[in-house]
Image (cartoon, helix red, strand yellow):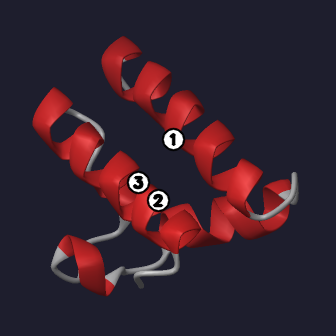
Amino acid sequence: MKATELRNYNRALQAVSDYFDGDMEAAELWMQRPTGSLGGHKPIEMLSTEQEFHAVLSAINRLEDGRM
């Protein structure tokens, strides 16, 4: 994993773990599963560009808002 991907992974993992009330196992599973709001892609596969990273953050925000 490149430095940018690692940074984005850590930021996304923290955001989604907040959604899961600090449950890192649930957060890591979410990052590794295909997600409909990301066109069936796994969030972990969408961390190499800022545009993809922001799509992952947007998906997490929709989870928090109950729109998924």
Reading the image, the residue beneath label 3 is 44
- Residue in view at x 47 percent, y 20 percent: 7
Q: Does the residue at mark 2 contact the one at mark 1 (Cβ under 8 Å)?
A: yes
- Residue in view at x 87 percent, y 52 percent: 22
Left or right of 64 in this view: 23: right
Residue 4 lies, with reference to residue 37, above or below; the image says above
Reading the image, the residue beneath label 1 is 12
Q: Which quadrant would the C terminus be assigned to in this image?
A: bottom left
x and y percentages locating residue 3 in the rendered image: 39, 13
Q: Residues within 10 Å of mark 1 (few under 14, many from 20)?
A: many
Q: Residues within 10 Å of mark 3 (few under 14, many from 20)?
A: many
Reading the image, the residue beneath label 2 is 60
State the SS at label 1. Answer: helix
State the SS at label 3. Answer: helix
Residue 33 lies, with reference to residue 55, above or below; the image says below
Distance from disc 2 to disc 1, alpha carbons, whole Å, reads 8 Å
From the viewer's perspective, is the residue at label 2 or at label 3 nearer?
2
Q: Is residue 49 visible?
A: no
Q: Is residue 24 visible?
A: yes
Query: Toward which corner of the image does residue 59 lie, by quadrant?
Result: bottom left
Q: Residue furthest front?
A: 65
